[in-house]
Amino acid sequence: MEKKNKRELLSIIEDQDKNLLKYKSRLHDIIGSYKNLLAEKETLQNSIKTLTEASVVISTDETSENNENDLSSEKKNELCIQNLKSSLGALTIERARIENELKTDRKKILQQKEDLEKKLVDSENKYFLEKEKCDKLIVELRRKISDQQRERDKEQQDHVLMLKELQNVLANERAMKEKLEQQISELLQKFSGKLSEKKITEYERTFDDLRAELKSTRENLNAARNEVKKKEILILKMQEEIHEMKSQYQSKINEEKLRADTAEEKLGMLVFVKEERIANLESRVSELSCIIGDHDKIKLQDQITIEKLKARISQLQNECAAFSSHISTDDSKLLEFRQFTEVKDTVQRPRTHSEPLYVNTDNSHTEENLHLHCLVEISELKKELEQYKAKCESVLRERYNKSSAALLSDAKAGKEIKELKSKVAHMQDQLQSCKSQLKLNEEYHSKITSNLEKACEDLKLIHKQEIVQIEASGKAHLIELEHQIQKQRERTLLLLEEKDKEIGHLKSSFLSSFIQKEKKPDGDVAEHVELSAIDQEAATNILSHSLISSKKDGHILHYVQELARKDVEISNLRQSRIQSESNVRKLEQALSTIKEKYFDEVDALKSRIKLLESTQDQEGTNVEYLKNVVLRFLKCNDYNSRKHMINAIATVLHFTTNEIQDVKGYI
């Protein structure tokens, strides 16, 4: 237990180390992106500051009246332009760096994809080669087993034919024996009274010859039986060897099947892992393409803003030039006004000079007229100055309002971009969680399918083992029946030998008694001829009747016993056959139910997998995400939120700009 706990703790520590490394790499990437964003923010802030300073400088330039202020405003404008150029250069450098990083990432992903495809092709080739080897081995083993089964069938047929021939030989010998015995009995009946010593000796010789022939035939029979026994022993040995070979081949086939199944499972797992990897890479590529599209859009927007700023700068330069020209004209008018004021002062000075007091009336009238004319011109010039100042102030105010509105719109756009980025990050997190849940579901379903396949294989193996056991029990029962039949045959042969011995003993005793009677004196012969003839006839009749009855009774009893045993064996075999058939049917029914359950579960899992696959389209976009966005869009009433949702739907479904504008126009 302690070892297991230690192993579990070590595995947990390793997993945590791996997770820490992943989080470190992610933090490093986040820090780099954050630094880049800070740099972009600083550049944008600098550009905004320069624009605001430029507007302030323009407003201050309106109030200023000196040429030195004009020079300082031009310098400040040049500094603003330089700052804007530097910020634009920094932004372009940053964009180029991001594009290069994206290109390198894309190249790496494509290289990884090609490597994985190559590995997959190699593994598939290896699998097909191993499968072909296994198929060839299975075909060879099946061919060998079929050849051995044919040889065994041929040997069994040969042995059956040999047994039939031996049975025919036995039947023929028995028939010959019966015929000989009948001939002997007939001869004894015919020539019982007329036998002479010569004929008796001849008959004894023939009888001895027949006995010798019987012995030779019996020896031949015994030899044949021994050969049959030896051949049966060899047959049993061959059957055992065949069973062993079958079991060995079956075990080898099972091992090969297990290897093939394990190889298929490994290959399936590799294919599954590689498909997941490819799907992840494709989703990553799609995300990167979306990011690249967003960056391109931002780049276009930046270029548009840069062009607008350049146009604004050119307008400001033109306005500054026009303003400077107006100021120069105003200066000339001011100089004239000063000259007029000097003239006026000279006119209105007190006459303290050493001129005479008497002046002509004509001169005084001319001076008064000039004075009035100058006053009128001065009033007109003042009015023109006030009108020009009002126009300049209104123009500057309008331009300032426009610049402030543009800055406010840029700030709002930045806020919207931030909100969209946060929403995109949230949606990416949701997508990753959905993908992880989908992976877990797929792993769970793959485990269920593997367990079901293993259970089916186990049931198949159990069914095969039960069939083999039933076949073995049937074969053992058949072998026992063959042994019993052989024992019965031996018993019958022993009975026949005993009967033959009894017959021979009776014949010998009868012949000896008959010979003793004939050796008596001739005087008694005449008296006892009739008695001996009568006794001989009675003895022969009794002997023949006893022999015939004993033969008939023995044959009938043996036949009845054989029939009874045969009927019992047939009934036992029928019962065992019925039981085995019922067992086989039960097993087939159980197997069919298990197969139906297995196929039902497989169909359910396939439908589940199809549903999970249907939740994603060809480009990897999640249909569930789209459904949720559409539902929120239909439920929402706020204009801004509906606008954001339209943007999200347009990015997912790849709307064109005209389509987006049409939808926004309907809102």
Image (cartoon, helix red, strand yellow):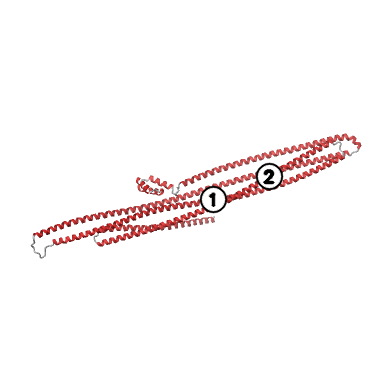
Which of the 4 quarters of the picture holds residue 342? bottom left
Where is residue 389, by image quadrant?
bottom left
Q: Is residue 92 left or right of residue 109?
A: left
Residue type for callout 2:
Gln
Q: Earlier in the sequence, mark 2 or mark 1?
A: 2
Question: Which image quarter: residue 482?
Answer: top right
Q: Nearer the viewer, residue 388 or 529?
A: 388
**Other residues around mark 1 within 10 Å, as few (<14) / some (14–19) / many (≥20):** few
Residue at the spot of label 2:
156
Residue 62, compared with residue 201, is above or below; it is: below
Residue at the right extreme of this rendering: 523
CA neighbours of label 2 inside 10 A, class few (<14), some (14 to 19), many (20+): some
Q: Is residue 559 above or below residue 140?
A: above
Closer to us: 158 or 353: 158
Work out whether residue 148 can be spotted. yes
648 or 439: which is nearer to us? 648
Please state the horizontal and vertical placement of residue 179, each as a whole percent of the image: 78, 38
Q: What residue appears at the point 76 percent right and 37 percent down from the top-left corner?
A: 553
* Quadrant showing the C terminus: top left
Residue visible at 52% across and 49% down in the picture? 447
- Pinpoint residue 25: horizontal percent, then vertical percent: 45, 57
Which residue is denoted by mark 1 in the rendering? 265
Element type where label 1 sits in the image: helix
Q: Nearer the viewer, mark 2 or mark 1?
A: 2
Point out the image quarter for the N terminus. Answer: bottom right
